[in-house]
Image (cartoon, grey):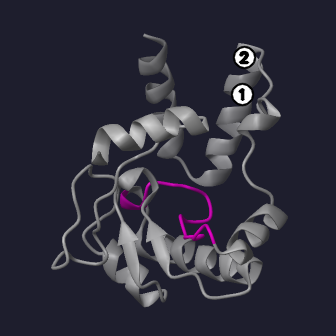
């Protein structure tokens, strides 16, 4: 029941312009009496963290929009700005061009793949849990969504899916 409520609230928030969604989110967290920041372990990466990961050579930093809005809910111009601005900002942080993109929540409109291509990305992933094959559209690559796991649980998660 709690998860259904969270998803229902998120669905309402995601359909508003970002500034309105932020204000509504502040109202909900104030009503619930919770700290919107949450525990430090749940905070996103800092710009410095992103740059360090990109330069480290073990992790590929990819684009995911500026505000994590579902792209199929945005007008094409707004979606294009989210995609383009994300690539520019991440490329600056990484010190090199960002090549891959992942659609927030795996959601995209029919024209979104073209917007991602036009922004300069080489490929994009959705969140449809399927295997990817060479002849697949490079702007509609399926992927497996990975939950927030520690190293041991992540290893088990991978082993169960790919053996």
**Rendered position, 30 above or below 158:** above
Mark 2 = which residue? 31
User: Residue 133 at what x, y percent from top left?
Assistant: 19, 70
Label 1 close to label 2 by CB (< 8 Å):
yes
Dominant SS of magenta comes to: loop
Kind of element beneath mark 2 = helix
Magenta stretch?
58-72
In terms of depth relative to the viewer, which is nearer, 111 or 122? 122
Mark 1 = which residue? 27
Q: Quadrant of the C terminus?
A: top left
* Residue shown at 42% from the left, 89% from the top: 118
User: Residue 103 at what x, y percent from top left?
Assistant: 42, 61
Asked if residue 76 lies in the magenta stretch, the reply is no
In terms of depth relative to the viewer, which is nearer, 152 or 110? 152
Residue extending furthest toward the front: 163
**Rendered position, 80 above or below 117:** above
**Rendered position, 5 above or below 109:** above
User: Residue 49 at what x, y percent from top left?
Assistant: 79, 62
In terms of depth relative to the viewer, which is nearer, 144 or 108? 144
Q: Quadrant of the N terminus?
A: top left
């Amino acid at each position: 029941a709690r998860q259904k409520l969270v998803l229902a609230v998120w669905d309402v928030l995601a359909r508003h312009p970002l500034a309105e969604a932020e204000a509504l989110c502040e109202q909900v967290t104030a009503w619930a009496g919770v700290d919107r920041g949450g525990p430090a372990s749940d905070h996103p990466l800092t710009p410095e963290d992103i740059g360090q990961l990109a330069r480290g050579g073990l992790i590929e930093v990819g684009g995911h929009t500026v505000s994590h809005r579902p792209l199929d809910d945005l007008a094409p111009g707004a979606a294009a700005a989210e995609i383009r601005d994300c690539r520019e900002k991440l490329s600056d942080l990484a010190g090199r061009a960002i090549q891959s993109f992942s659609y927030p929540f795996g959601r995209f409109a029919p024209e979104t793949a073209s917007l991602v291509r036009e922004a300069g990305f080489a490929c994009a992933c959705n969140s449809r849990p399927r295997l990817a094959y060479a002849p697949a559209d490079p702007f509609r690559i399926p992927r497996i969504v990975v939950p927030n796991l520690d190293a041991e649980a992540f290893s088990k998660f991978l082993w169960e899916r790919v053996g």
